Structures are given as structure tokens and as C-alpha cells.
Image: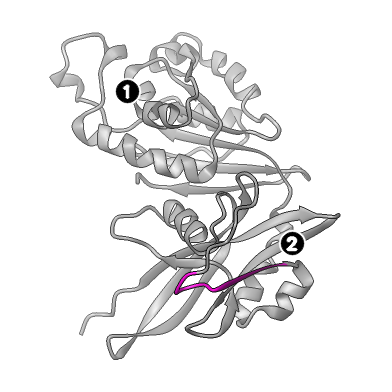
Amino acid sequence: MSNPATVIAAGGVVWRESHGSRQVLLVHRPRYDDWSLPKGKLAPREHVLVAARREIEEETSQQVVLGPPLGVQRYDVRKNGGTVPKLVLYWAASLAGPEQEFEPNDEVDKLEWLPVGKAKERLSYPRDVDILNCLDAVLPVESTVVILRHAEAVKRKEWSGKDTVRPLSDEGLASAERLSGVLAALGVNRIRSSDAERCAGTVTPYAASIGRRIHLHPEISEQGYEKDPSALEKVAAKAWKPGKVTLICSHRPVLPALAEALGLPVGKYATSAFMVAHRLADGRVIRERFGAP
């Protein structure tokens, strides 16, 4: 007999600073009469970062951006008369704007902002306290960098024009659209890209959605890197900007050197794969890798 499919869910710890104290947002679920952290199951083919943001916003009415990861919960739940494993991933989540008026619904009927210590006492499940205990260790974030390999392009052998203008394939265009939601969940607000069309085209849907221009850098194109491998250090030196979430889109041959210049681990990236790196005020860097959405 095959193992039952794992239920995948995502959520976050929504936090704010108020009167010199860090507060977190808890939700009350009338169905269970419990206090918990906002979370919910992924929709089919939904990226886990998109799901975390969506579930937080649906349950709390607050618009958020995701920060560093806080951990994973594993436990069993009842489903279809049996028991299946459940996996829940959590991120720190900060308000993306002014606090919004809460609209009670069937899933959540009450919210409450509480200081961290009181929130630990209010939470109904020790596993949620364990997640909350991780919050202070990942804050404050000074700056964030997302490095991304471009989406799938038309194959070289099928393209007769200049390589710099080789466009995304149909699958690449679809992936670029999906990436837009992921980048929104991370709150990307600075966009840097190779000047090659396949890189610029990958980040264009997101740039258009937030009304930001794409800063093109020949230094991180394949041709630019071959000509002068050290030139990308200029891009890397300006990437860690305090208070900003900077996206850098480049190519497979360039990304290892770019990662090294940023002080990040060197690795291989499939098309549309990316790394998110958060630099904390104490100098530590928290990072996580994701495949294509």
C-alpha cells in the first residue's frame, strides 16, 4: 500500500514594532475554538511562498511581505476517515502598508496583536510556540537579495539571430508570469538584470505589475562576463542596499561568480530557480533555495 499524500501548507508570523515592543498577530478559529498562527493549504501548483502570503492575507486582511524562514511543522491530521501527514512551512511576515480593517469570516472570527511573551501564552499549540520562538533570531533584516536564473529560452539551435535577443520560450513566458507572484510575496522593490532579452523578459511581468523600471547590466550577461569577469563585482557591491529587496537576474555561467561576489554559496541553478538571502543587522545571512515556480 502506498503512503498517503502529505498535506502541504504554508503561513507566517505577522509582526510589528509598537511602542518599543515587538507584537505578533494571532488568529482565532471558531471551528476549533483555538488561537494559532495564520496558515493554510497550497492550491494546486501554487508556489509555497505565494501560498504563505495568500493565506496570511485571507485570514488576517493584512497585506504582507515575507522575510526569513522560521521553520517547519510536521504532524498528522484526519482526512477522508484516515490519518495523513501534514507539513507546514512558516516565514516571518511584515506589514506591507498601513494596517487594514479585519473582516471576520467562517475560518477566522477574531484577531489579536500581542507582545511575543503573551502570544506564547495565548497560542493553543506548543508547535506554534516553537515557531514563534524562532522569530527574534531572524530579525531585524537589514537587506535582502534574490538571485535568479532566467526562465527557459528558445533553444540556441532554433534561433538564427543574435544571442542577446534570443527570447523566452512559451514555457519560459509562463514561468515568468508565475515568478511575478513569488517576487511580490518577497516584496522585491529593486530590479537588476542582464541586458540579454531572456533575462529582461523573465522579470518584465513583475516589473510591470509594480511600475518599476528594470536596470540592465551588461556586466552580468554571458558576453559581458566573458569579456571582463571582474566587472560583475560592481553590481554585487551595490546589491545589499539597506531596507531594500533587490532582485538580480542572470545566466547559468555567471551566477556562481555572482553568488561568490555577494558572499553566498556557489551552486547550480535550473531555469527560473532562485535563492533568497536575508542579511541581518548582526551580519548573519539567512538563505534558502527554490526551484522554478
The residue at the point 44 percent across, 11 percent down is 224
Q: How is the image coloured?
A: one colour
Three-letter amino acid code at the position of disc 2? Gln
Q: Residues within 10 Å of mark 2 (few under 14, many from 20)?
A: many
Give the residue type at disc 1.
Arg
Which residue is identified by label 1? Answer: 198
Q: Give the quarter of the image for residue 4.
A: bottom left
How packed mark 1 is, by other alpha carbons closer than 10 Å (few <14, some 14-19, many 20 or more), is many
Residue 282 in view of the camera: yes
Could you tell whether 153 is left or right of 84 in the image? left
Q: Is residue 245 left or right of residue 267?
A: right
Q: Is residue 107 magenta?
A: yes
Q: Can you give x and y, in whole percent of width and height, for residue 48 in the image?
A: 42, 56
Q: Which residues are magenta?
A: 105-113
Q: Position of residue 90 (x, y in %)?
A: 54, 62
Residue ID at (26%, 37%)? 174
Query: Please, which residue is most extreme toward the bottom here?
Result: 81
| Image: 178 above or below 169 | below
**32 over 16 or under it: above or below:** below
How far is disc 1 from disc 2 in space, using C-alphas?
43 Å
Q: Nearer the viewer, mark 1 or mark 2?
A: 2
**Residue 163 x, y percent position in the rendering:** 27, 13
- The residue lying furthest to the left in this view is 158
Q: Which mark is residue 23?
A: 2
At numbered mark 2, what does the secondary structure look like: helix, strand or loop?
strand
Left or right placement of residue 259 versus residue 290 in this view: right
Q: Position of residue 252 (x, y in %)?
A: 38, 29
